[in-house]
Structure formats: C-alpha cells, structure tokens
Amino acid sequence: MVVQQQTIKNPITLTGVGLHTGVDCTMRFLPAPENFGIRFRRIDLATQPEIPAIVDYVVEVTRGTTLALNGVKVHTVEHILAALVGLQVDNIIIELDNIEPPICDGSAKPFVEALLQAGIEKQSAPKDYLIIDQTIRYVDEKKGVDIVALPTDDYRVTVMIDYNSAVLGSQHSGLFDLHKEFISEFAPARTFCFLHEVEALHDQGLIRGGNLDNAIVVVDNPLSSGEIHRIATKLGITEAILLGGNGVLNGKQLLFKNEPARHKLIDLMGDLALIGVPLKAQILAARPGHASNIEFAKKVRKLYLQKALIKKYQFEKTEGVVLDINGIQRIIPHRFPFLFLDKIIEFKLDERIVGVKNVTSNEQFFQGHFPGQPVMPGVLILEAMAQTGGILMLNGIENPEGKLMMFTAMNNVKFRKPVIPGDQLILEMEMVTNRKKICIMKGRAFVDGNLVAEAEMSAAVVERNSK
C-alpha cells in the first residue's frame, strides 16, 4: 500500500522562551510542497536563511541538538522534530524570529497540539521510507550506550535509562504503535535534569530560560534548604522552592511513573528525524543521549544515501548484485574496449566497494600480450581497480554522472601473480582519506582468494567536460 507524504493545511504560530538561550521567540509552522522535507528558517536575519533538518548540519549536542549552516544556528530542535515524526509530517517550514524555538512546557505536546490545530494534509507523492534490512549498531562502552536498529515492517522505539539514581531508578519505555500511542502516551513527557547539575549547566551558559514550569528537577543528592535556595537565587528563580517528598523539586507530580524514560524516547525520535526520511525499523536504545543519538543517526543516514544512490542507477534488483553492467555505465564514462568492470557486489558509501571483472579469452589485449601465453597487463588490473574505486568516490558526490575521477598517483604497487583467461578478478577498494574532491584509496585484486595485485591510489574529481 502506498503511503502519501503529509504537510499541514494552515500556518500556525507559537511564542515563548528558549530553554538554553533564554531568548523570546515567535515560531510559525508553514505548509511545504512535496519532497521539501523539514527546514528551519531564520526570518530575523536579512536573507532569511534555511537550515534543512539533516544530521549533517548538527554542530552541538550539549543538553540539546543544535543545527547550523553557514554560521546560522537553531538550538534545541529535538522536541519539534519528535512532534513531526509522531504526526508523520514530512514537509514543513519552521519559521523562527530568534536562535531558539520556545521550550513551552518542556515536552512535545504543545507542538503536537499546534500542528493538529493547523490540520494535517495528505499530498500526492509517496513517502520515501528507509526500510532497515540489516542490523545497525552504535556502542559507546565508556558511557554504557548501546543503540541498535533491527528490521521490522513498522516503526517501534524502546528506551532504557539508568542514571544510578535512587529517585529515578532504572526505567524503560516502548512505543509500538505510532498512531495510537504517541499523542497521549509520549508527547506530554517533559524534559528533566538533576538539581546537582543545574548550577554547572547555568555556568556553561545553558538553561537560561529554564524554570520549574518547563522542566522536572530531580533532587538526587542531599542538599540543605539553604543550598537549594542559594542555587535558586543564582538561577533567578523567585518562586518558593521546596524539596518534594517524591524527590522532585516542589513536589511536582510526574505525568507517568517512567516520564523521564518517555522523554528520552521523545528526544531519540527527534534526533533520528535528522536522518531525513521516515523509518521502518525497531530501535532499541540503552542509556541514549543527544551525542549518541546523533552518531547513530549519521550511520543510518549513510545507509539511506547508499540505498538512494543504488536505486538511482540500478533499475532492476538482482540477488547478490549491487550494480550490474548497466548501472555501472550510468555512473562511469568508460566503454568498450576500455571498460574493465562487470558488476559491483558490495558497496558501503565512503568506505568500501567490491567489483568483479570476468577475464575472458576474447579480451583484445590478449592478442599481443602475449601471443601463445596470454597474461592480463598489470596496468589494466590497476585500471579495473581504479574504475571500481571511481564508483566508490563518484557515488559520494553530487551529480556523479557529470564528473570524472582522475588518478594523480599510485604508490606501493605490487603484482603478485599473473591473471590469465578464465580468471575472475575480485576488486576490493577501501577509502583511506576522502577530502571533498580528493581522496586516497587502497586497492587489492584477488583470483580464487589469492592476492594478485595491490596498490595505493590518489585521485581527484573533475568536471567531465573540463580540459
């Protein structure tokens, strides 16, 4: 069944203060066309620059996720993005007249309510789902973080948190049905912090807009009333401060027993929105935070870009083949008699590629190299490796069909065994360094598992029509 993209029907406005910067901000949600995606627009700046909600533009992850492009920033985007994921909105413009959107009550609920008031509208184009068909994992052993994406036919998220806190304990929560559970069971979950962290966060220039109405403050370490009031005075909190019997400042009641875990799930949903497409996956996360969420999102987005590029050039899917000869010819300009690559059987964007060259007796070069004892010229083995590497490099840039990869150097070239008619060359290329339009790759060629040639290659990308 085809699921259509969605936007909102009407513009809608919210106002409030930013959590970390403390700035006043008016934010407006606007409808956007199909395939537009999610973009933040800073209308307080002369050029009204836009920042796509893509993980490539994340620049800060200290207690929130910050996007930046060309020096223009938007802080604390995760709750808005979680609301958009929860309501399955694909295309929208988020206008801001300052650097940070309103924190409201510290949850995603105010944004959900505003979007529902604006109305959700279906569009004609189908959603571009990223269907996870392999296990993707991120681990940070020092912080005890473990995030994994597993194949499934819908969207599910499970989170476990453990801060070694006597008040919070170990908590977990799971969202298994986006349609039925998100609005009522997760969107209201509010952000939280520990009282012993608050002073340090304030000293770092954060939580300037934080107060007891937009955050749950957990008192985990014993503090005297005098110490609590000293911190409150420093933070500019004028209301009466009490240590609640439930371990929460002023005895504020939790909306859910595991509200902190539910909020961490919301943060994770928002950060994973930066992959840039809706997911069909089961996400399991132990002790997630913004830094780990973003690193995981980068891994998943790389898989999405890889799949998108393969889909662009390989029209028919064949078992065990990433790109067939037709797909290869849509990317690189080489043609008979100088195309020495038959198919690609493995491809990891910006990392590794494996190609296959079937060496037949009909190769033209065997007529003269050598009569009666045919041997594939070593330079042509290198050329086959280079063509394989060209796909790895060109597929990582915009409009690869309009580019050429020119090799600038080859080092540590070694030929181990001769290649003869009937052999099948397996060409492995690994990216060592990739800096914009210049890269270094390490290549190896095998026949029947035996190394026949290897080299390190430097290359540059140029426009195909350049001279």
Image (cartoon, rainbow, N blue to C red):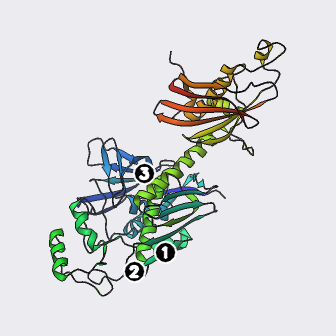
Q: Which residue is mark 2?
A: 255
* Amino acid at dot 1: His
What is the quadrant of residue 208 in the picture?
A: bottom left
Is 241 or 359 nearer to us in this picture? 359
Of marks 3 and 1, the one in the foreground: 1
Residue 306, compared with residue 284, is above or below; it is above
Mark 1 packing: few (<14 Cα in 10 Å), some, or many (20+)? some
Q: Say whether residue 113 is visible.
A: yes
Kindly give the residue lying farthest to the front in the view shown. Answer: 416
Quadrant in which the N terminus appears: bottom right
Mark 2 packing: few (<14 Cα in 10 Å), some, or many (20+)? few
Q: Look at 28% across and 58% down and name the residue there.
A: 26
Residue 276, compared with residue 427, is above or below; it is below
Residue 376, given in percent of the width and then of the height, sits at 74, 21
Compared across the picture, whether 2 is left or right of 457 comes to: right
Numbered badge on residue 172: 1
What is the quadrant of residue 210 in the picture?
A: bottom left
Residue 282, given in percent of the width and then of the height, sits at 58, 64
Query: Mark 3 or 1 closer to N-term?
Result: 3
CA–CA distance in space, label 2 to label 3: 30 Å
Q: Say whether residue 8 is visible.
A: no
Q: Which residue is mark 3?
A: 53
- Label pair 2/3, CB-CB below 8 angstroms: no
Compared across the picture, whether 150 is left or right of 376 comes to: left
Q: Look at 82% across and 17% down and name the residue there.
A: 373
CA–CA distance in space, label 1 to label 2: 15 Å
Query: Mark 2 or 3 closer to N-term?
Result: 3
Q: Look at 22% across and 64% down and name the residue there.
A: 202
- Label pair 3/1, CB-CB below 8 angstroms: no
Residue 130, compared with residue 251, is above or below; it is above
* Amino acid at dot 2: Leu
Compared across the picture, whether 377 is left or right of 464 comes to: right
